[in-house]
Amino acid sequence: MADQLEEIKRKIDIVEFISSFVPLKKTGRNFKALCPFHSETIPSFIVSPERQIWHCFGACNEGGDIFKFLMKIENLEFGEALRELAKRAGVKLTRFKPSESEKQKQLLYEINHLAAEFYHYLLLNHSVGRQALRYILGRGISKPSLQLFKLGFAPNTWESLQKFLVGKKGYNPQDLEKAGLVIKSEKKAGFYDRFRSRLIFPLKDHRGNICGFAGRVLDPEAKEAKYINTPETLIYHKSDLLYGLFETHQEIKRVDGVVLVEGELDAISSFQTGVKNVVAIKGSALTPNQVQLLSRFTKDISLALDRDIAGD
Ligand code: ZN
C-alpha cells in the first residue's frame, strides 16, 4: 500500500494538481495562493514543488500532501481520495480496505446509479413512460438533454423500483431506505417506493455521483406537492448540492462565470439554448457551502431567480 501511495505521489505533480483548484503564483522556489480553507486577503497558502507538500501559514495552519488536500477540499474520506487520485495517476490499487462508512456511501451511490438507469429506461424506452416523455418534450426539453441529464420516469406503482433493485438486483430494502428511495410502510410490513408518477431528475454532485433525486408531478393541477426530493441521507445534503454542476463546471471555468437559476428545468432549458455555464439551486436558498463550491470554478456569479419573494 505504502508503495502505491508513493507511486501516485510521484505521478501527480502537486503544483499542477492544486492549481486545478486554486490559482497558484510562483514565489521563489515555492508557489502561493489565498488559502482555500480559510478566509484571507494576503496569501499564506504555500505549495512546495520540491517537497511535494502544501502548508497554510495563516489561521488554519493546515498542511499535507495531495491526498490531504483532496480530502479537505472535496470533503472526502481517505479511501475516496485515494481511489480518485489512483485513477488520475493511472495506478491500479492492489490492496485497500475501505472504512465502514465509506463502504456504506459507495453502496448508496451504486443503488442510486441503478435507480437512475431504471427510471431513465422507463422514460425513454417503455410504454409506461410514454405520457411523461410526451410531456417533457412538449416543454421544449430535447432528447439529447434528457440523455445528458439522465431524466427518468417513476411509474404510478408502489413497488416497481423495489422489484427491480431488490427482486432483480438483489439489494436489500433497508439499504434502499437509507438511500431515500423507499419508505417504511406504517400499515403493513415492508416498504413502498417514494417516487411515484413523477418525472425524475437525478441529483449529481460535481464529481458525477448520483446523491439523490427530485421528482416532479406531470399534472400541473395535481394536489400533491409539485416536487418531492430525496430526504437528507449519508450522501445527499440539500444545502451542498448545485444541480447541473457536474455537466457544466468545465464551461463555468472556461467562461469564468456562472448563472444561477431556480429549478432543474430552468437549468436544462438554459443549457440547451447555449447558456451552458448554469447551475440550479433548490427553491431560493443559496448556502455558504454552495458559494464556496462555486468559487472553485469562478468568482463571478449572476443570479437569474424568479421575480417573487423567494427570488428576492
Ligand atoms: Zn488556511
Image (cartoon, rainbow, N blue to C red):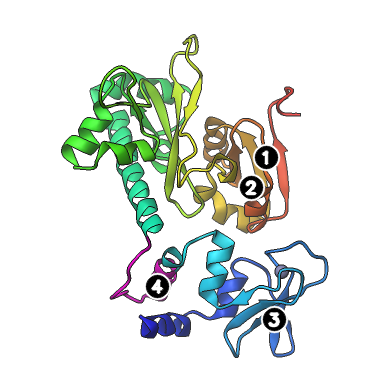
Residue named by callout 2: 290
Side of 286 where 5 appears, left or right: left
Query: How far is mark 3 from mark 1, CA to CA?
Result: 32 Å
Mark pair 1, 2: CA separation: 7 Å
- Residue 122 vs residue 288, the one in the foreground: 288
Question: Is residue 163 in view from this perspective?
Answer: yes
User: Residue 266 vs residue 127: left or right?
Assistant: right
Residue 11 position within the rendered picture, expressed as x and y whole percent measured from the top left? 45, 82
| Residue that badge 1 annotates | 286
Point out the image quarter for the C terminus: top right
Query: Label 4 amino acid?
Result: Ala
Front disc: 2 or 3: 2
Q: How many marks?
A: 4
Residue, x 74% and y 23% (percent of image)?
309
- Under mark 1, the amino acid is Leu
Residue picked out by circle 3 = 31
The answer for how far apart the CA atoms under marks 1 and 4 are is 33 Å
User: Which span is picked out in magenta?
Assistant: 82-99
Respond yes or no on whether mark 1 lies under 8 Å from ligand 1: no
